[in-house]
Amino acid sequence: MKTIKFLMATALFLLSFNLVNAQSVTEVFAVSGNCGMCKSRIEAAAKEAGATAAAWDTDSKKLKVSFDANATSLSKIQEKVASVGHDNAGFKASDEVYNKLHGCCKYDRTSAEQTMTATSCCKDGKCKDGSCKNTSKDCCQNGTCDKKGKKGKACCENCKKS
Ligand SMILES: [Cu+2]
C-alpha cells in the first residue's frame, strides 16, 4: 500500500513537473546493442548527457529518452551514447571504443548500418529528397521534420525509402 501511494505521488509530481516545464521533450531513436550490460551502459550515458529518463528496449533496440530542451539536446544524448560504443540514429561509435566493448556487447554493425540508413532520411531537420515519400510519418510531410516542434532524426524513425 505504501508503495502504491508512493508511486501515485511520484506520478503526480512528474505530471505537474511536465505541465510546468514546457521544454520537457521525449524522443525515441534506434540504438544498437545486445544485452543487459548494453542497456545499463546506454541508459547511463543518456543520463550523463542530461536525460531525465532513459529506457532502452533490448528487443526493439530503441532508446526512449526524456530531457529538458533547455539543458541538453537530442544530438548531445546521441553523441554521448555513441561515445560509449553504441551506434545510434544520430552518431556512430568509433571503432576503437566499439572494439573495447565486452564480447557479448559487440552487436552486429552490418545491421546497425541498415538501421542508420533507415533513419538518415532526416538531416538537419529536413527530409532528404525522395527518401520519405509515401510514409505515414507525417513528420516528413512537406519535406520537413518539424512536427510538434521536434527537430532531429528521431522523428523520422521507421521512415523507409519508398
Ligand atoms: Cu551488451
Image (cartoon, helix red, strand yellow):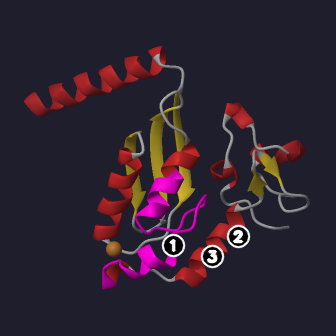
Q: Which residues are magenta?
A: 78-103
| Residue type (three-letter) at the residue carrying disc 3 | Glu
According to the picture, the residue beneath numbered tag 2 turns out to be 117
User: Do the CB atoms of the residues marked 2 and 3 lie less than 8 Å apart?
Assistant: yes
Magenta run includes residue 88: yes
Q: Mark 2: is the Cβ under 8 angstroms from ligand 1? A: no
Residue found farthest to the top: 20
> Ligand 1 falls in which quarter?
bottom left
Q: Nearer the viewer, mark 1 or mark 2?
A: 1
* Classed neighbour count for the residue bearing mark 3: other residues with Cα under 10 Å, few (<14), some (14–19), many (≥20): some
Task: Using the numbered discs, state the Cα–Cα distance from disc 3 to disc 1 in whole angstroms.
Answer: 13 Å
Q: Mark 1: is the Cβ under 8 angstroms from ligand 1? A: no
User: Which quadrant would the C terminus be assigned to in this image?
Assistant: bottom right
Residue found farthest to the front: 96
* Classed neighbour count for the residue bearing mark 1: other residues with Cα under 10 Å, few (<14), some (14–19), many (≥20): some
User: Residue 15, image x and y in percent?
Assistant: 39, 22
Q: Residue at x 36, y 45 (%)?
A: 47
Q: Residue at x 67, y 52 (%)?
A: 153
Q: Is residue 25 above or below residue 94?
A: above
> Mark 1 falls on what kind of element?
loop
According to the picture, the residue beneath numbered tag 3 turns out to be 113
In front: 91, or 127?
91
Q: Residue at x 83, y 58 (%)?
A: 132
Answer left or right for 17 relative to 113: left
User: Residue 120, image x and y in percent?
Assistant: 72, 62
| Residue type (three-letter) at the residue carrying disc 2 | Thr
Sequence order check, earlier mark of 1 and 2: 1
> Mark 3 falls on what kind of element?
helix
